[in-house]
Amino acid sequence: MGGENGTHKNKSEKRARLAPNGSSDASNPPLGALEPEVFKEENNGSMEPHEKDNTLKDFYFGDDDDDEDDEDDEWQPSKILFDHENSFCINCTVRNYDCTASSCEHCGAVKASKVNGYDAFQTKIGDAISSRYNASSSSSNTAFGFDERMLLHNEIETKSYPHPERPDRLRAIATSLTESGIFPEKCTLIQAREITREELLNVHSLDNVEAVEQTKNMFYSYFTPDTYANAHSACAAKLAAGICADLATSIMSGRFKNGFALVRPPGHHATIKQAMGFCLHNNAAVAAIAAQKAGAQKVLIVDWDVHHGNGTQEIFDGNKSVLYISLHRHEGGNFYPGTGSFVEVGTNGAEGYSVNIPWSCGGVGDRDYIFAFKNVVLPIAKEFAPDMTIISAGFDAARGDPLGGCDVTPAGYAQMAHMLTSLSDGKLLVVLEGGYNLRSISSSATEVVKVLLGEKPEIELEDPMPSREGLESVLHVLQIQVHYWPVLSHHCAVVKPFLDYYSLSSVINIGNQTRKRPHYTGPFWWKCGSKRIFFELISKRLQKKRLMRHDKGIR
């Protein structure tokens, strides 16, 4: 969240346990963290049960069965992904109640016990590290950032539902890139390093940096009920940020034309003072600062993650050298994190340098996103004329994502990426953010990397017809941003024919509201977290429905 609200303090206690070699005192938690709970051992060595987090994920997600069986060819790799032992789908993490089903009841993925094919990626990344495909001998224009130590960032505490931000996300994408012949044949692996403390302080407060660093002395801990850390998380977060910084520097120096950062934990929710929303360090913000230090005068960040990047917006609020454009599900502030409304345009003389395109509902897809790109994103971006473009590439707006509830396809992501290659003389860095359906994120990320390699999208929407809701959102944005970007006046005229189609003779004129930025924090329960509680809500609803159907079938 923006401004002081970005501190996002948690009312419940932060649970923490010291690592075996930790030196931290449980009575003195790290700055920025909350008081750790003291765990008591029973005589048999087991841990006492924890209190359940009293959080609520308050957005609507339809629980109708997805009909994707006829579209499996669109999602690759296809050998995915089901966990027999606890009935949670490996692909989307939603619980399945029919043990006899051959595929997931929610996403349609076929049964399996792990991400297949990652072993091949491990072998090839070993070859890349050992110099067969090293930077000095490769002629590739596309850099690739990854380090297996980021897989060690994982939720340690056993809970009733798996956490959606899990190591398999990287494994699935890496497997797809290998099976597609992209890595390491067509891109260059850069050497990973941990970001320095000094570099992080360009983005985050000292208390925040120290809070994340102190987690290395804890077996596990939580910044919010959905934002976990273990003894390896500080290293993983520093590697992610370091990879993004070095990719940005290498692209600006001309060593590479573009790059893809396969990193986690994600970053765009991490504010100046607070880790939140699965994010520890803000990787895109670190990359933007690194690009500027390498010579970029102006940096564009396009955030297409389904959640608003409240952290990125806050970090660059009031900064006219960084233009932040976000397309996200908002629903009038009722979708996590609640920020990113039309009227959040920037402050302190930098009005117009935050551009938010908030969707009023779920279900928006390729046509809505491409329509917004053609009429808002690209016109403003070309007028801004960035020296470098960074994509905060969350793939949780993809079809089948358990959190996003939207309908963007791999082809849609590829077209958006292709449109952005026309900026910054092709200097483009793609940074992984969210995305929790493994076959959706692996297919989407692969198509985006193909664009970086110079391939054109297989399908391009020339004049997309947006949904009624998508059109209304774009019109609101045009009405507000035209005050700061006069180039949009032409596009206000372009969209008028669509008004007649939907019988929308007028929309609410809210341009005057841009004079004052709202001091909005979202519903009070967001102060406790949480994205993941949504899994419990949807799974319970699915369980009730299927049990009712099962009973009717018996009768």
Image (cartoon, helix red, strand yellow):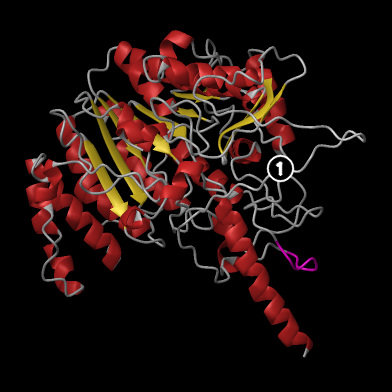
| Residue 491 seen in render | no
Foreground of the two, 477 or 113: 477
Does the magenta portion include 381?
A: no
For the C terminus, which image quadrant?
bottom right
Q: Would you name the residue on which mark 1 appears?
A: 50
Picture quadrant where residue 323 is located: top left
Chief secondary structure of the magenta portion: loop
Residue that appears at 40% across and 28% down: 284
Name the spot of residue 538 as percent of width and height, x first. 58, 62
Does the magenta portion include 97?
A: yes
Residue that appears at 64% across and 33% down: 15
Foreground of the two, 135 or 65: 65
* Left or right for 231, reference 223: right
Magenta residues, start to end: 96-102
- Residue 489 position (above or below residue 48): below
* Left or right for 147, reference 345: right
* Left or right for 545, reference 9: right
Residue that appears at 26% across and 55% down: 371
- Residue 181 position (above or below residue 27): below
User: Residue placed farthest to the right in the image?
Assistant: 44
Name the spot of residue 402 as percent of width and height, x first. 55, 55
